[in-house]
Image (tube, rainbow, N blue to C red):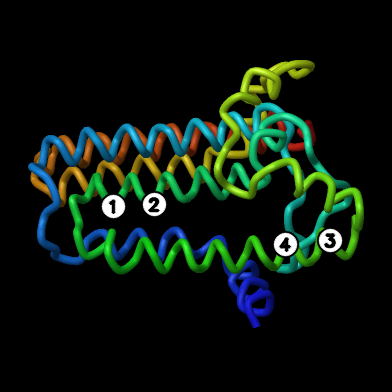
Amino acid sequence: MLVRFGNWFFRYRNIIFPVFYSALFIPSPAIFGEKQALLFGAVIIAAGILVRSITIGLEYIIRGGYKGKVHATNLVTGGIYSVCRNPMYLGNILLILGFGFFANSLIFLLLFFPFFLIIYYAIIKAEESFLSEKFGEEYAGYKSKVRALVPALGKIRGAFKGYRFNWLRVLLREYNSLYLYLSGIELLLFYKGAIGFIPALILLAGTFILYGFVKTLKKVRYSDYMN
């Protein structure tokens, strides 16, 4: 049942973040003062972006899904995957948590964030089921040495050995997500009254222009980029 539940959510995982993001705008009792919440949330959001960027920049799973189903052509265990088995999901969890604090939303953190964790737990179990069936003892050995989400901090330095960090790959793989994060932050700042309409409009327009520039650059200059 849990694996089937995880497979279903895996199929629609790309819309999970926007759906949860919309819940940030539900009126809610505050957790902290506004300045403290914005600062604390921004730090956690930055941590989530950093985790995702490091994952992609070192050794990225080029295809983690195929036709809406869990898929893998090889078992990736290097780079940040030697620190935890699901670093992209760890980054996403940090992002959702950070946005909850950034929005200063008690309702989001008490209701929506736990549900998000349940969804990701089910997705992880679905992926584990697939990987165990496909890679057998190789995956079992990897799973026994590396935790699912909690990173082994002592292994972080070793995760960078033998790799050259690929900033271009991060930019080309993450520009859609970065646009979502930045525009979300700007909308929340406006919604919370931290910035006025004109500054918010300028920030949103600037972010959209940067997004369009990177998207065009990828299409024109790096359309065949595979690294």
Q: Which badge, 4 or 2, is on the more N-terminal residue?
A: 2
Mark 4 neighbour density, 10 Å: few (under 14) some (14–19) many (20 or more): many
Q: Position of residue 7 (x, y in %)?
A: 67, 73
Marks 3, 4: nearer the viewer:
3
Mark 1 neighbour density, 10 Å: few (under 14) some (14–19) many (20 or more): many
Marks 3, 2: nearer the viewer:
3
Per the rendering, the mark at residue 127 is: 4
Q: Quadrant of the C terminus?
A: top right
What's the distance in space between the residues labelled 4 and 1, CA to CA? Answer: 27 Å
Horizontally, residue 133 falls left or right of residue 162, namely right
**In the rendered image, the vertical position of residue 63 relative to residue 123, given as above or below:** above
Residue at image coords 14%, 65%:
27
Mark 2 neighbour density, 10 Å: few (under 14) some (14–19) many (20 or more): many
Q: Position of residue 21 (x, y in %)?
A: 35, 59
Per the rendering, the mark at residue 147 is: none
Q: Tell me the amino acid under the disc marked 1.
A: Gly
Q: Residue furthest front?
A: 144
Provide the residue designation for mark 2. Answer: 96
Q: Secondary structure at mark 4?
A: helix
Residue at image coords 39%, 51%:
96
Q: Which badge, 3 or 1, is on the more N-terminal residue?
A: 1
Provide the residue designation for mark 1. Answer: 100
Dividing the picture into quadrants, the one containing residue 132 is: bottom right
Q: Answer yes or no: do the residues labelled 2 and 1 have beta carbons within 8 Å?
A: yes
Q: Answer yes or no: do the residues labelled 3 and 1 have beta carbons within 8 Å?
A: no
Near-viewer residue (143 or 3): 143
What's the distance in space between the residues labelled 2 and 1, CA to CA? Answer: 6 Å
Provide the residue designation for mark 3. Answer: 132
Q: Position of residue 8 (x, y in %)?
A: 63, 76
